[in-house]
Image (cartoon, rainbow, N blue to C red):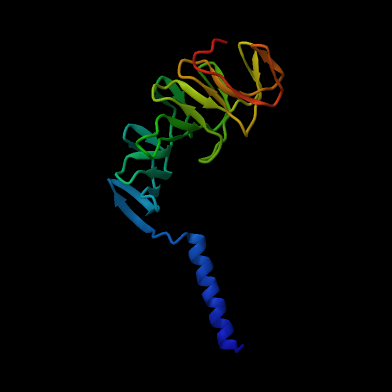
Amino acid sequence: MTKTVKIFLNLSVSIAIGLWVSGCKTWEYHVVKQGIQFEKIYQSKRGANIGYMTENRHIQGFPCEKGWIHFKQDWQLLSCQLSQDFLYNSTLLPAHTWIHFPYHDDQTGYVCSFPYDVEVQGYVCGGSGGYKGTHTGFYDSGRLRSFYPPEDVRFNGILCEASLLVNIQLHEHGTLQRCKLAEEYQADGKTYRKGKTIEFDITTEK
């Protein structure tokens, strides 16, 4: 193999790796869209607009912190990090919370990634401090839907394990829907071992 061929192959491989790493994203730099100044922005394969804002902005009623922000293709807000404490659906969300709305119309509710552990409707919900960190889920009504507790939590005699692999899920009216058992549990003549994930029907009274 000649030196020229080796150089050409090495260059081709480098270009291919560069395209793979960048995901073939087409970035726009230092642009204004929807009245928002972006340092950079691109559109994902599914159509979402993902950009880096240069300053804090109130967007669609939310105080969004400068940095990364996500929109649907029609520019409806998908995700942002709150720049200040914000009361939403009767829950006080602390500054630097990430709030995420569903992308598809058939999905409901929203989720938050708290910067630290936060008490919500009587339960301590684990914080993560990152966009993709531990999520706390809410129904459209604002009622708590799911969370990851920092410690085991008891629901009317049922001790649920604090696990990063299995969250605790609640029915909208507040009763337990699903959790991983932190201790043995007996009901209706059955024994459920510690560590088992069990679900409860919405009509089940605890």
Residue 42 placed where, x, y %?
38, 54
Quadrant where the C terminus sits is top right
| Residue at image location 44% in from the left, 62% down from the top | 24
| Residue at image location 47% in from the left, 59% down from the top | 23
Kindly indicate the quadrant of the structure image that contains residue 183.
Answer: top right
In the displayed image of the protein, which residue is found farthest to the bottom? 2
| Residue at image location 44% in from the left, 21% down from the top | 91
Q: Is residue 166 above or below residue 21?
A: above
Q: Is residue 84 left or right of residue 11?
A: left
In the displayed image of the protein, which residue is found farthest to the left? 35
Q: Is residue 169 above or below residue 19?
A: above
Residue 137 placed where, x, y %?
48, 28
Residue 154 placed where, x, y %?
63, 16
In the displayed image of the protein, which residue is found farthest to the front? 189
Residue 55 placed where, x, y %?
38, 44
Quadrant where the N terminus sits is bottom right
Q: Is residue 115 above or below residue 17?
A: above
User: How many numbered markers are drawn?
Assistant: 0
| Front-most of residues 136 and 63 | 136
| Front-most of residues 199 and 45 | 199
| Residue at image location 43% in from the left, 25% down from the top | 139
Q: Is residue 58 above or below residue 196?
A: below
